[in-house]
């Protein structure tokens, strides 16, 4: 939920408006309270002025005659923004009222209302609307004749004279002049009536316009005044709210009012991909008017200036997105290139387009070369076609948008990386705490529960409790071991002792444990292995952990009566171990994520008894550290095949502990590889290994190419550097008791 931002006090009797505005206010952390009349609103302001964020008046339901009373109330609470929701009726010139504010473009139908009224209408236009002649042109297209004044100086007197000129005079009688006697008409002196609608340039503040409106209505009470700004309605509203000024919005824009109330300063610098604010600078007024109208017609906000000095005086960083500069600007203190450099110094993100005089040719070439030297966006030859300028502006603004968007995304990524780094640091510390502060007392719990079990054999009831303690401790130990292994993998400290590997012995050891579980769950368990395998290198404990994990998963996700098969296949360059089940299978959409840490499919979550979803992640890392890889084939509802392969050993393997030499009767030591005083003669090659079930001669093995006089793998001298697997980072002490994992 958004943080509480205050209360909007709404004067209306329209329930539909309240219901439309309430969700938008709530999403911005604003509370909406409706009252039916101005006296109720005044009471609310008096009792809870500190909690009111804005007072909103719906002139769709409230009488326009209350506008004066509302302005008086505003004087009593100047710290609270007042927002007037206007309708076509409330802004009509036929309705007398104090100064009203209008957006640009003009509201639909307003020009027709001006044409139909008999009242004097004064429109105070900002510099852009006046310089581009956009406002007079829009009124003329509606059939309204206007009088344009470049200043408000003498405006009150002008309106007074026009009022007198429109006032009918009594019919004069008396002597006629010579021309009067010839024409038969009385002498009259006509005062020119220029028009009822005046468009005056007003570059000042709205508060100054309110004072001018009061002076006009004192002299010409029937006159109505409007202040019209070319600023975007949203930006203008947000700026007025920030300055605690009176805000006027069309009623259909009421839904965006909470956005304007909570807007920050950053919104003023934001640029949507489809619009922008443009500074148009040129000393030729017809060019300003024509190009300004075209840009405003294309949906851009335009600000005009006739010189670089004037533009720099009103310039603020972030106020404009793009500048269109006529390079010959009023023979001013700065050339076009100097002016562009000053703009870039104040706002590095601003895009700039030059308009270069076509003649003389040397000046045109110089202007184009400056665009390249300064890294500007484009150079257009005068006279500039409106369509060509709009195309260039679109490209420049799109480039600006993409550059700023890249910067924003980069900052987001950097912040996300910082947060992830903090999270990973916390995770490492947590895993270290688990490894040292939890695993040790857990080992004691397991040990004492075993002792209790032995001593309580004569008491079946108490023995059951001890068994539950031991079983739960083993499950927790398995989970903690997974976390410790994951921490070691992600910190690069998981060690593997690579030595000569008897994979068939590893499979046999795992088989003895899995057969018990298979019998309990009534699952057909089979192991398919060849009689012999090519020489392999690996860590028996770690690879036993991998096979155990795959078999345990297969048992857990296979229903009663199903089948699990462990298959070992030899290839010329690798050995493939597969665990095949007829279990629940995995959906195709989940297969790419199956190796992610903590990931479990929805089907697995329903059947899983315990586990973090780390088993496959750890198993794959172990296989990769042996130079192999792990894969999966699965179909939902049919079953799965998890497999991994190990590369065949092609060179002697080091890193076998010296104490293990006594237990390797089938290995021979070449002369010179061990100290001379204590040589150990090789034992007969036919001596069977204790853990190998097959007979020594192995007659069933396929006949490989003859390898005469090839001895058993040799052991390098003591102290030789160990052979590390691809991707490995160290060595891990041998596991005395390979963990039984229920993944």
Image (cartoon, rainbow, N blue to C red):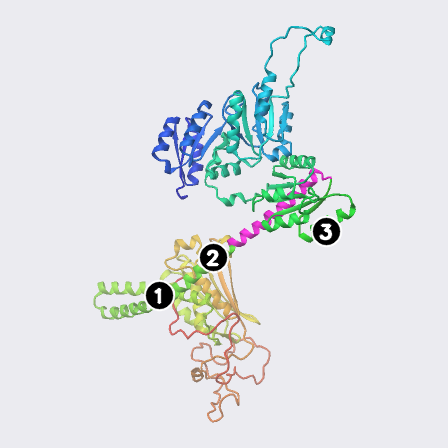
Q: Which residues are magenta?
A: 383-412
Residues at discs 2 and 1 in contact (Cβ within 8 Å): no
Q: In this image, 447 relative to 630: left or right?
A: left
Among numbered discs 3 and 2, the one appearing first in the sequence: 3
How far apart in space, not on screen, are marks 3 and 2 (Cα)?
70 Å
Is residue 741 among what the camera can see?
no
Q: Residue 195 — which label? A: none
Circle 1 residue? 477
| Front residue (pair 519, 313) | 313
Name the chief secondary structure element in magenta. helix
Question: Where's residue 675, x and y in %?
Answer: 49, 90
For the point 45% across and 72% down, the residue is 495
How far apart in space, not on screen, are marks 2 and 1 (Cα)?
29 Å
Circle 2 residue? 639
Number of residues whose C-alpha sits closer than 10 Å to that of mark 1, classed few (under 14), some (14–19) or many (20 or more): many
Magenta stretch containing residue 384, yes or no? Answer: yes
Residue at disc 3, secondary structure: helix
Circle 3 residue? 369
Position above or below: 659 against 630:
below
Question: Where's residue 468, x and y in %?
Answer: 28, 63
How far apart in space, not on screen, are marks 3 and 1 (Cα)?
74 Å
**Can you name the residue that lies furthest to the left here?**
459
Which one is in front in this view, the residue at disc 3 or the one at disc 1?
3
Q: In this image, 517 relative to 404: left or right?
A: left
Which one is in front in this view, the residue at disc 2 or the one at disc 1?
1
Position above or below: 105 against 338:
above
Which one is in front in this view, the residue at disc 3 or the one at disc 2?
3
Q: Quadrant of residue 615?
A: bottom left
Among numbered discs 3 and 1, the one appearing first in the sequence: 3
Question: Where's residue 411, x and y in %?
Answer: 52, 54
| Front residue (pair 32, 238) | 238
């Amino acid at each position: 939920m958004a943080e509480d931002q205050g209360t909007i006090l709404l004067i209306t009797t329209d329930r539909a408006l309240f219901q439309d505005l309430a969700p938008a206010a709530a999403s911005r952390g604003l509370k909406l309270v409706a009252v039916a009349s101005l006296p109720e609103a005044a009471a609310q302001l008096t009792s809870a002025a500190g909690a009111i964020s804005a007072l909103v008046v719906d002139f769709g339901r409230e009488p326009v005659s209350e506008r004066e009373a509302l302005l008086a109330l505003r004087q009593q609470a100047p710290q609270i923004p007042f927002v007037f929701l206007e309708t076509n009726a409330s802004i009509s010139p036929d309705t007398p009222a104090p100064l009203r504010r209008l957006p640009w473009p003009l509201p639909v139908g307003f020009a027709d209302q001006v044409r139909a009224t008999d009242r004097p209408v004064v429109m105070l236009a900002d510099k852009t609307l006046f310089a581009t002649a956009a406002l007079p042109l829009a009124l003329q297209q509606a059939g309204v004749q206007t009088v344009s004044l470049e200043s408000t100086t003498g405006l009150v007197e002008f309106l007074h004279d026009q009022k007198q000129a429109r006032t009918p005079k009594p019919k004069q009688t008396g002597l006629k002049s010579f021309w009067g006697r010839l024409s038969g008409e009385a002498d009259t002196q006509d005062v020119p009536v220029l028009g009822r609608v005046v468009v005056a340039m007003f570059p000042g503040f709205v508060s100054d316009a309110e004072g001018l409106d009061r002076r006009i209505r004192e002299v010409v009470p029937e006159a109505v005044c409007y202040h019209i700004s070319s600023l975007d309605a949203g930006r203008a509203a947000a700026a007025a709210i920030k300055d605690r000024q009176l805000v006027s919005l069309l009623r259909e824009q009421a839904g965006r009012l909470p956005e304007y109330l909570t807007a920050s300063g950053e919104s003023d610098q934001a640029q949507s991909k489809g619009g922008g604010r443009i500074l148009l600078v040129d000393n030729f007024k017809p060019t300003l008017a024509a190009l300004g109208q075209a840009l405003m017609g294309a949906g851009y906000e335009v600000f005009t200036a006739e010189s670089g000095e004037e533009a720099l005086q009103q310039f603020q960083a972030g106020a404009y997105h793009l500048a269109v500069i006529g390079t010959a600007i009023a023979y001013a203190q700065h050339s076009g290139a100097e002016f562009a450099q000053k703009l870039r110094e104040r706002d590095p993100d601003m895009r700039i387009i030059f308009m270069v005089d076509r003649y003389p040719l040397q000046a045109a070439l110089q202007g184009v070369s400056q665009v390249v030297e300064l890294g500007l966006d484009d150079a257009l030859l005068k006279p500039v076609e409106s369509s060509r300028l709009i195309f260039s502006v679109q490209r420049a603004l799109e480039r600006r948008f993409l550059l700023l968007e890249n910067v924003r995304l980069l900052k987001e990524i950097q912040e996300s990386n910082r947060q992830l780094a903090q999270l990973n640091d916390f995770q490492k510390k947590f895993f270290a705490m688990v490894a040292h502060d939890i695993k040790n007392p857990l080992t004691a719990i397991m040990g004492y529960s075993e002792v209790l079990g032995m001593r309580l054999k004569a008491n079946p009831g108490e023995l059951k409790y001890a068994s539950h303690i031991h079983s739960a401790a083993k499950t927790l130990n398995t989970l903690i071991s997974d976390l410790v292994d994951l921490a070691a993998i992600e910190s690069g400290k998981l060690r593997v002792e690579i030595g000569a590997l008897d994979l068939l012995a590893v499979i046999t050891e795992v088989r003895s444990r899995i057969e018990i579980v298979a019998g309990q769950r009534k699952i057909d368990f089979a192991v398919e292995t060849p009689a012999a395998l090519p020489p392999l290198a690996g860590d028996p404990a770690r690879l036993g952990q991998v096979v155990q994990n795959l078999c345990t998963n297969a048992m857990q996700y296979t229903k009663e009566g199903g089948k699990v098969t462990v298959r070992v296949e030899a290839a010329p360059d690798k050995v493939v171990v597969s665990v095949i089940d007829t279990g629940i299978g995995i959906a195709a959409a989940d297969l790419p994520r199956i190796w992610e840490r903590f990931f479990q499919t929805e089907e697995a979550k329903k059947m899983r008894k315990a586990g973090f979803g780390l088993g496959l992640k750890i198993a794959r890392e172990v296989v990769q550290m042996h130079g192999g890889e792990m894969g999966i084939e699965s179909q939902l509802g049919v079953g799965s095949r998890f497999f991994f392969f190990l590369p065949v050993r092609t060179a002697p393997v080091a890193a076998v502990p010296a104490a293990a030499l006594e237990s390797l009767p089938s290995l021979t030591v070449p002369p010179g590889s061990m100290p001379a005083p204590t040589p150990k003669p090789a034992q007969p090659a036919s001596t069977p290994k204790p853990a190998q079930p097959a007979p020594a001669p192995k007659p069933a093995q396929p006949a490989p190419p003859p390898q005469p006089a090839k001895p058993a793998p040799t052991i390098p001298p003591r102290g030789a550097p160990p052979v590390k697997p691809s991707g490995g980072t160290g060595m891990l002490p041998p596991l005395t008791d390979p963990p039984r994992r229920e993944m």
